[in-house]
């Protein structure tokens, strides 16, 4: 029997993506677990978004979020559409809703 994903993972992912695309870096990082807080600053979040925007142009919209359980984590994948390209936002959550991983991936490699 497959493990059940964190019940509100889709809503959590959408909230994080909304904060991310609207440059609310401190709202995103406030959801980080201790390891993420130690490894990724608000400045680095902003630099990552600037890099993606430089590659693909302005953000346009996102698709449906899929959630999947793996061990003690729930991972979500959300397609992101930009003016000149597409990416996937992959967010991994702990059961307490904190973020254990945040990636913007090329859809061909996710």
Image (tube, rainbow, N blue to C red):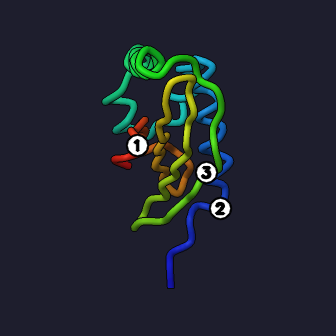
> SS at mark 2?
loop
**Of label 3 and label 1, which has the lower sequence position?**
3
**Of label 1 and label 2, which has the lower sequence position?**
2
Q: Which residue is mark 1?
A: 101
Distance, label 2 to label 3, CA atoms, is 13 Å
Task: Identify which residue, 74 or 108, lies in the foreground.
Answer: 108
**Above-or-below relation of 102 to 37:** below
- Quarter holding residue 40: top left
- Quarter holding residue 21: top right
The structure residue drawn at horizontal position 39% and vertical position 30%, both measured from the top left corner, is 37
Q: Which residue is mark 3?
A: 65
Discs 2, 3 touching: Cβ within 8 Å = no
The percent coordinates of residue 25 (x first, y second) are: 53, 20
**Above-or-below relation of 41 to 85:** above
Task: Identify which residue, 35 or 25, lies in the foreground.
Answer: 25
How many marks the image carries: the answer is: 3
Q: Which mark is residue 7?
A: 2
> SS at mark 1?
strand
The structure residue drawn at horizontal position 34% and vertical position 38%, both measured from the top left corner, is 35
Distance, label 1 to label 2, CA atoms, is 18 Å
Q: Is residue 91 left or right of residue 97?
A: left
**Of label 2 and label 3, which has the lower sequence position?**
2
**Above-or-below relation of 40 to 98:** above
């Amino acid at each position: 029997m497959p493990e059940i994903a964190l019940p509100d993972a889709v809503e959590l992912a959408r909230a994080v993506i909304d904060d991310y695309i609207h440059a609310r870096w401190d709202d995103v990082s406030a959801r980080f677990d201790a390891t993420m807080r130690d490894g990724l600053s608000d400045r680095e979040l902003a630099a990552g978004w600037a890099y993606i925007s430089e590659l693909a142009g302005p953000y346009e919209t996102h698709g449906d979020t899929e959630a999947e359980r793996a061990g003690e984590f729930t991972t979500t994948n959300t397609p992101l559409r930009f003016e000149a390209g597409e990416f996937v936002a992959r967010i991994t959550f702990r059961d307490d809703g904190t973020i254990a991983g945040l990636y913007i991936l090329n859809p061909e490699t996710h």
